[in-house]
Image: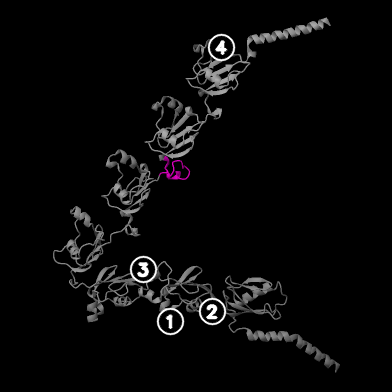
Amino acid sequence: MHHVACRLRSAFALVRSLSVPLLAILVLTQTIPASAQDGIIFQVGDVVRLFLPGEAALDRTFQIDRSGQIDLPEVGRIAISGMTEPDAEEQVRQRLSIAFRDLSRFRLRLDERRLLLTVLGFVKQPGLVELPGDATVQQAINAAGGLAQGAQLDRLQVRRAGVIVRVFDYKAYLDSGDPALLPALQPLDTVFVPASPLIGNVQIDFDGRTLAESGDAAEDRAAVKVFGEVNRPASFAFRDGATVIDMLMRAGGVTRYAGVEGIRVITDDGPILFNLKAYLESGDARLLPDLVPGATIFVPIQIEDVQAGELTVYVMGEVFRAGAYETRSGADFLDVLANAGGPTRFADTRRIRLLRSDGTVADFDLVAFVENPTEANAPPDIDPGDAIFVPEKVDFNRPSWLKVPPDRAVMLFGAVNSPGRYEWSDEMSLFDLLAEAGGPTARADLANLSVLGEQCSSGRPLRFDLKSFLEDGGNLRDVPRIRAGCLITIPELPRDINDTKVQWTRLPSESAIYIYGEVGAPGRYAFNPRLHFLDILGAASGPTAIADLRQIRINHRDGPQPRVTKLDLGLYFQTGDETLIPEVLPGDVIYIPSQNRNWLDRLPSETVRLLGAVNRPGRYSFSDDMTILDLLAEAGGPVATALEEKIVIVNLSCCQDQAQLFDLIDFAKTGDFSKLPVVRPGDTVYVPYESQSIYRMVLDGMQDIISVLGFVAIIGAL
């Protein structure tokens, strides 16, 4: 009995030890989905189920994120997208082995397919959506709040990895319910709903009915344009098998004023006449013209007094009675134009065009024909089926400058009252253009008018001095010839003649003059050949108190080689001789040095050196009308120990190695100016000290001898 009891206790212990694994195996067999097969490949969005009995943190579901990974406790993120179930299970098991020991009962299975998509464009709530694995485009749109008003239904896109993989007609699916018309979706796809081109470039609130009445064309090239006497002119999307009748019905049908016998269908092969009345009376489908993408349907207005037929011509645009007219034998272009009432006051009679039935276009200038009726300006021949188009005259007071092509306009910029873009005709001149622009402003620099353009200059700006032409006159042939496409610029003078910092960039270098040095306002100034040197000096606020007016330099840069002119402005103020002022041209540089400038800046040939026993020895400026007395006075005169009888003048300016003596004491006694030596710039004047005289040197020597003899006598006495 003891052995039996022991065996029973062992059996119960074994059952207790196996109860948890057996229960886990039972749950595992009941919860693993039937779709779990080795052929399943995980993808982004899938929900996977992990089974690890005893670990609650891992015994649950996880979703594969957009990066293809699942985020597990303890071990972090693991990439399993693109793997089969066995491979993914082994991948996760290896990572879990870092933190868990017993993984023998670990399992990984697919729990649910999910789609992670992005819906953008004209939907009510664009953004990220999550759907079941078998979701369709319609479910994706519904998850984004549905379509917004203005969505283009026939051009929806499916993008994959940034590339458009499918463009499909969602409207066709809504019409038929055929799911084959919808593309299959994959995780991370983007469904884009474009906007209808009819809503324009501005966000506005509207209703669907208004938009539908404006057409539903997705692309201008393939759209069928219906206009004229229809209730809702618009552009409509082309559909295979559509007829002219279909398009007219989509445009709301024709109006009561429609000329149904002369409907025009214009394709690449040319205009085709369609008689709607004949078709409705006979029902003959052969009367329907073929409709191709990009076709244009025009329904003209019915004109009672002109019958449409094989001899019909059309007059459109700015005429008093536009419409279809029947020609007569001998009728020409002007007859048809007159029958339409002629051009209105808004018509551009210089650009009348004849649209021939063969597709060619002929231009006609009615103004040129009236002014000069030659064969070259004659009206073009007109044939049945042709159309005369009289365009509207461009009004430049309105923002309609795009109506004039670049080859018929000129551009005027700068200091004029109305700069802008102007329509041009070759019989006009530069003065006509300036008058149309309201003339130049008060700050206009007319001396530097510039013309640029392939038809007006040879690649470089053409300069013209309009100021000189207006004030002095000239030959009209010298005025630049303006052509369509030219660019005319009139620069503006600086606001303040002293403001050289803010406005100087507006002034071209070839129209400016530079003044530096000792002036009140050095800088860059506007200048023209009419101005004088003193004008620019006055504009710079004149010279300063320490300016050296006798050493002014002008650097002339107008010639092939630079040259420098010296100006003695002090002499000009003394004599008033205008010939002393050199001619100054734009581009020149004026420099006024300082009297206190560094002695190294002065040339030896322009100064006199004064050395020796004077109060302020140094280098001094000297002119021919000065004497040695002026020089000594400027240096503060000789000192008390100066040897004034032996002043030495070394003449280096005229004669090599020549010197002369000057006795200042003797001159002071006599006052004879003829005894004054000649001193010129470049010479050297030396005033010796009294100790350097021979008498003083002998006297000093005698004192030394007496001292020695007295010393010797004392020694002898001792």
**Above or below, 251 relative to 561:** below
Mark 4–mark 1 contact, CB under 8 Å?
A: no
SS class, disc 4 = loop
**Above or below, 77 relative to 9:** above
**Residue carrying label 2:** 133
Judge by depth and name the residue closer to the eye, 544 or 568: 544
Q: Position of residue 64 (x, y in %)?
A: 59, 74
Mark 4 or mark 3, whichever is nearer to me: 4
How far apart marks 4 and 1 lie (CA) works out to 131 Å
Which mark, residue 500?
Answer: none
Mark 2–mark 4 contact, CB under 8 Å?
A: no
Q: Which residues are magenta?
A: 493-509
Q: Is residue 497 rendered magenta in the image?
A: yes
Q: Position of residue 208 (x, y in %)?
A: 40, 76
SS class, disc 1 = loop
* Sooner in the amino-acid sequence: mark 3 or mark 1: 1
**Residue carrying label 1:** 178
Judge by depth and name the residue closer to the eye, 375 or 211: 211
Mark 4 or mark 1, whichever is nearer to me: 4
Callout 3 amino acid? Asp
**Residue carrying label 4:** 663
How far apart marks 1 and 2 lie (CA) works out to 20 Å
Q: Is residue 503 rendered magenta in the image?
A: yes
How far apart marks 2 and 4 lie (CA) works out to 124 Å
**Residue carrying label 3:** 220
Mark 1 nearby-residue class (10 Å; few <14, some 14–19, many ≥20): few
Q: Residue furthest left?
A: 329
Q: Position of residue 136 (x, y in %)?
A: 49, 79
